[in-house]
Image (cartoon, rainbow, N blue to C red):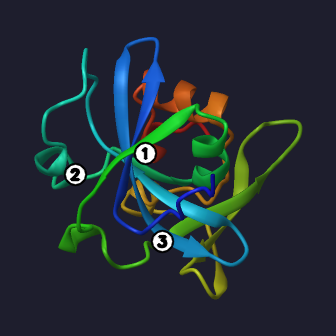
Amino acid sequence: MARKALRVGDVIEIETPRGLAYAQYTHENVKYGSLIRVLPGFHESRPRDVAPLAALPSAFVVFYPVGAAVAQSVACVVMNVPVPAHARDFPLFRAGTRDPRTKRVREWWLWDGQRSWQVGSITSEQRKLPIRMIVNHNALVHLITTEWTPERDQQ
């Protein structure tokens, strides 16, 4: 049986130690792959309609191999709903390399999906930008379970 192709707008269900979590596939990037927006909250069972949940602001966005996760049955597509207006544009990300000794980033870059530019230190407003990273399934579950946000990240 052929696997159904993922479509932008697909909402996926992810089991976590705190209950079911949901994310929406929003963009595909040639270099980093599938971008998802993690939706807020945990659920004991699947909501009858996830469309209202998908309309909420994102908890965070991250690159995640959605196709592989669905193929491996660690996530499943529950429905397709339009990406809300507030999440349709490709987000601006921050990126940097951690110093191996301090585990902190000294020089930050911003990335719009096509080009990068160095900004050095970041402002408190830029600290809220998503961090450009690709996560595997276990890392995604950890981020969701701990209610991680880029703003509170210790980099």
What kind of residue is marked 1?
Answer: Glu
**On residue 151, which mark appears?**
1
Q: Residue furthest bottom?
A: 115
Along the polypeptide, which appears first: circle 3 or circle 1? 3
Q: Residue at x 35, y 79 (%)?
A: 89
Q: Are marks 3 and 1 in contact (CB under 8 Å)?
A: no
Position above or below: 138 against 65? above
Along the polypeptide, which appears first: circle 1 or circle 2? 2
Q: Nearer the viewer, mark 3 or mark 1?
A: 3
In this view of the protein, which residue sits in the foreground, 13 or 99? Answer: 13
Q: Is 43 on the left or on the right of 116, as rendered?
A: left
In this view of the protein, which residue sits in the foreground, 69 or 134? Answer: 69
- Residue 121 visible? The answer is no
Which element carries disc 1, helix, strand or loop? helix
**Residue 48 picture location, percent across and down:** 13, 34
In this view of the protein, which residue sits in the foreground, 96 or 142? Answer: 142
Q: Residue at x 62, y 87 (%)?
A: 114
Residue assigned mark 2: 54
For label 2, the crowd category at 10 Å Cα-Cα, with few meaning under 14, some 14 to 19 and many 20 or more, is: many
Residue assigned mark 3: 27
Which element carries disc 2, helix, strand or loop? helix
- Residue 111 visible? The answer is yes
Q: Nearer the viewer, mark 1 or mark 2?
A: 2
Which element carries disc 3, helix, strand or loop? strand
What kind of residue is marked 3?
Answer: His
What kind of residue is marked 2?
Answer: Ala
Q: CA distance from mark 3 to mark 2?
A: 15 Å
Q: CA distance from mark 1 to mark 2?
A: 22 Å
